Image (spheres, rainbow, N blue to C red):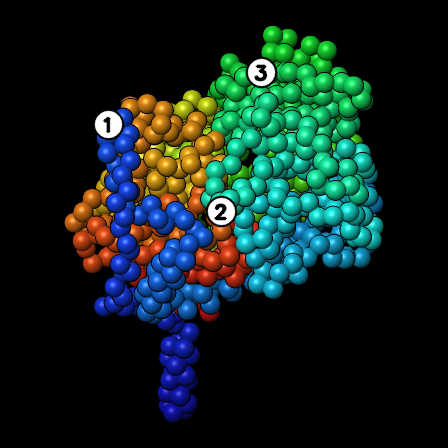
């Protein structure tokens, strides 16, 4: 009997030991290969009497063999460092397991078919499927995974004709913003006509079954198409089965130069609606009556001071979203016969919350942001409130749009701890039901996500949402990632990230600050973070870090910061202004040279947010002071930094990251690694293959955990 008890106890102990989570500790002594010796040239520029050195200007030439050799050398240093991290492969394995679940989009009806996107788990790109009726057999309609061997050619937009019989779709190769457009017969997927090329920053709009409207620039011929400045965005009409060279110029060009021109048709296809802008905020608005072949464009708004767009029409009556005299947005109506602003009538008045409207089923859906959290109200077309739509919780709800005759629509609800769930909504009754739930391996009940308000440098209250595992002790020892953006009127609302599970299940903290410059509180909040107010954004971010440390969520030795694009600028500015505050910095595809950003691709259109160094002496001095590339100081101990960019990024060209990394490596005086990870055959971010995303996220978390001295618990 005793022997049996001993055997049982021994087996129990052995079983328990086998099921304990194994912790892989960070490596004590990491080695860093010598950084490449980046050549310096004697480049000087004069700005209003101030001489500015730019010794790494040659890295702006993305076509040169010297630049390619530098990229190769830098990647070798980075890979050598990352390959030493003992839990790198364990993180990759865990991410692949987390990613490997079936994912769906909300369905949409086109002609006889219901279409939806699906990814079986680890497919590089989502596949577009279709079926007839609720019980029809699913069939693959477009599979981007077959577009290229390495999964780097992505589906970048699909637009059907009104009757669903024709479809035009865009593809992006290697992540570039330059697109190709292919037109098919939906029934048999037969290609119609030639492939359109050199299409950029464009939606597609069908005119009956006759052809499509699209936008583009003249592609640079004597310079790199990935970095050369682009101007004069033009709207064209392509008639089916005709040569692209014969496409008609509809709007834009030298007579009406614009950097951004977009077009769409009213659902009844009577009106062509055109927006024109020379920055990312504010636009002119025009309409053209397509029922009258001799009609000209009619001006609705003739200046670019505010944002406006038409959300619906009822015959000649337009329903317009506008920020004119309403920085949080409102909805007005006007008539085609005299549509200018003097004749606008308020339909849904401005409120204290930011409005983001849509329409469907003959209704108007007013989606509001209250402290970055979604609230949705349903109105009839007379502006009468029909109901507040009940949402599943506190988070972000998107998708309240449908066709005029639809009886139901689909919306997706998500938060930092709620994987995206798709709901079917009955427009008449207001009832919602779950359509598809996520199968990701994540238990929301084990985590909490709370909103706090902290005080920035000038006493402005800033919201931040902090997410972590229940039971985490606030003792200053938790690895933490602080994320921000703060620009271009873009709102950071709660959304679930499979990648972030890696941090949360290890007991880490994920924090997102809603900085000025974003759109969370309307246009006034946006403007408070632009041009000569841009420092507010950096102050807000730095104050968020100080709050997390003061409240003992973390400490400087455990704190990482991350952001991409404009958020990459944010990280670059924060780490150069307060290098001692952060242990890890992850600036992604960042705008890091603020004196020259407007000289590449469509960068000049960002001037509303940034201003340019050519504007005046005051604007130059302001940009020069915070520009991350120029703010780096010799003999300074910077945080462990991994700059990330991609060789095909033609929105924020990689030269920003190249020059910043080169100078950072020159000036850095501490032992922290300062690396650059350059993805090849990839762009600004959209359309990356699943394997690319997993590899990038693996390296991000491995770098963070290694440099915050955080062990990684293997989870089977």
Judging from the image, what secondary structure is the residue with disc 2 in? loop
Determine contact: label 2, label 1, CB under 8 Å: no
In this rendering, the answer to whether 23 lies above or below 319 is below
Task: Write down the residue under mark 3.
Answer: 302
Crowd class of label 3 (few under 14; some 14 to 19; many from 20; radius 10 Å): few
Residue 95 appears at what percent x and percent y? 48, 62
Residue at horizontal 49%, vertical 45%? Answer: 223
Is residue 693 or residue 658 the one in the foreground?
A: 658
Q: CA gap, disc 3 to disc 2?
A: 34 Å
Give the residue number, with chain letter if any, for mark 1: 49
Q: Between marks 3 and 1, how big is the CA–CA gap?
A: 38 Å
The residue located at (39%, 81%) in the rendering is 14
Indicate which disc, 3 or 1, sits on the residue closer to the N terminus: 1
Point out the frontmost of discs 3 and 1: 1
Local crowd size for mark 2, using a 10 Å CA cut-off: few (<14), some (14–19), many (≥20): some
Q: CA distance from mark 2 to mark 1?
A: 31 Å
Marks 2 and 1, the one that precedes in the sequence:
1
Q: Nearer the viewer, residue 84 or 138?
A: 84
Q: Earlier in the sequence, mark 3 or mark 2?
A: 2
- Residue bearing the label numbered 2: 224
Q: Is residue 596 above or below residue 504?
A: above
The x, y position of residue 331, in whole percent, is: 61, 19
Which residue extends farthest front?
Answer: 222
> Residue furthest toward the top?
342
Front one among 548 and 693: 693
Where is residue 646 shown, x and y percent of the image? 45, 53
Circles 3, 1 touching at the beta carbon (< 8 Å): no
Tell me if I can see residue 424 in this picture. Answer: no
Judged by depth in the image, the label closer to the viewer, 3 or 2, is: 2
Q: Residues within 10 Å of mark 1 (few under 14, many from 20)?
A: few
């Amino acid at each position: 009997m005793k022997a049996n008890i001993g055997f049982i106890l021994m087996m129990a102990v052995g079983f328990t030991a086998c099921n304990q989570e194994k912790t892989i500790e960070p490596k004590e002594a990491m080695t860093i290969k010598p950084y490449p010796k980046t050549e310096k040239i004697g480049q000087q520029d004069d700005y209003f009497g101030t001489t500015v050195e730019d010794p790494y200007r040659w890295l702006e030439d993305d076509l040169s063999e010297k630049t390619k050799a530098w990229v190769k050398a830098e990647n070798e240093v980075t890979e050598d460092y990352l390959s030493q991290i003992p839990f790198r492969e364990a993180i990759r394995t865990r991410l692949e397991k987390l990613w490997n679940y079936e994912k769906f989009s909300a369905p949409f009806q086109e002609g006889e078919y219901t279409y939806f996107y699906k990814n079986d788990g680890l497919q590089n790109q989502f596949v577009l499927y279709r079926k007839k009726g609720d019980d029809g057999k699913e069939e693959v309609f477009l599979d981007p995974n077959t577009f290229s061997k390495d999964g780097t050619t992505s589906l970048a937009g699909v637009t059907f004709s009104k009757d669903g019989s024709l479809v035009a779709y865009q593809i992006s190769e290697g992540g570039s913003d330059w697109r190709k457009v292919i037109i098919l017969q939906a029934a048999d997927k037969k290609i119609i006509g030639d492939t359109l090329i050199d299409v950029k920053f464009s939606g597609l709009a069908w005119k009956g079954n006759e052809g499509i409207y699209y936008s583009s620039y003249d592609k640079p011929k004597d310079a790199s198409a990935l970095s050369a400045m682009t101007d004069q965005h033009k709207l064209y009409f392509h008639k089916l089965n005709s040569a692209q060279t014969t496409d008609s110029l509809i709007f834009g060009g030298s007579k009406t130069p614009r950097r951004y021109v977009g077009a769409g048709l009213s659902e009844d296809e009577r009106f062509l609606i055109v927006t024109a802008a020379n920055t990312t905020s504010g636009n002119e608005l025009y309409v053209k009556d397509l029922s009258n072949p001799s009609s000209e464009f009619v001006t609705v708004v003739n200046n670019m001071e505010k944002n406006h767009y038409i959300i619906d029409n009822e015959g000649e009556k337009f329903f317009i979203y506008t920020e004119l005299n309403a920085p949080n947005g409102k909805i007005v109506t006007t008539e085609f016969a005299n549509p200018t602003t003097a004749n606008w009538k308020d339909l849904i008045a401005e409120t204290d919350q930011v409005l983001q409207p849509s329409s469907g089923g003959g209704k108007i859906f007013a989606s509001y942001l209250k402290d970055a959290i979604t609230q949705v109200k349903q109105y009839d077309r007379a502006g009468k409130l029909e109901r507040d739509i009940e949402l599943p919780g506190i988070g972000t709800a998107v998708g309240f749009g449908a066709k005029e005759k639809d009886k139901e629509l689909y919306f997706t609800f998500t938060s930092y701890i709620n994987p995206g769930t798709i709901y079917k909504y009955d427009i008449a009754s207001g009832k919602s039901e779950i359509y598809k739930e996520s199968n990701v391996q994540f238990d929301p009940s084990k985590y909490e996500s709370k909103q706090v308000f902290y005080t920035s440098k000038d006493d402005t209250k800033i919201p931040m949402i902090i997410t972590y595992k229940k039971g985490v002790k606030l003792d200053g020892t938790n690895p933490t990632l602080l994320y921000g953006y703060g620009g271009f009127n873009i709102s950071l609302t709660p959304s679930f990230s499979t990648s972030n599970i890696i941090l949360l299940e290890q007991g880490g903290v994920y924090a997102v600050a809603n900085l000025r410059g974003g759109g969370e509180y309307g246009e006034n909040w946006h403007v408070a973070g632009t041009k000569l107010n841009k420092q507010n954004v950096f102050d807000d971010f730095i104050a968020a870090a100080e709050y997390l440390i003061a409240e003992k969520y973390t400490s400087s030795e455990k704190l990482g910061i991350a952001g991409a694009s404009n958020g990459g600028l944010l990280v670059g500015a924060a780490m150069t202004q307060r290098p001692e505050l952060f242990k890890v910095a992850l600036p992604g595809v960042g705008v890091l040279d603020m004196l020259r950003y407007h000289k590449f691709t469509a960068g000049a259109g960002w001037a509303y947010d940034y201003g340019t160094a050519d504007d005046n002496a005051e604007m130059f001095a302001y940009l020069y002071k915070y520009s991350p590339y120029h703010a780096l100081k010799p003999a300074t101990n910077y945080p462990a930094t991994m700059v990330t960019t991609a060789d095909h990024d033609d929105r924020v060209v990689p030269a920003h990251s190249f020059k910043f990394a080169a100078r950072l490596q020159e000036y850095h005086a501490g032992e922290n690694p300062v690396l650059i990870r350059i993805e090849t055959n990839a762009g600004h971010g959209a359309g990356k293959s699943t394997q690319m995303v997993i590899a990038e996220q693996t390296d991000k978390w491995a770098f963070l955990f290694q440099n915050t001295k955080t062990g990684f618990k293997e989870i089977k």
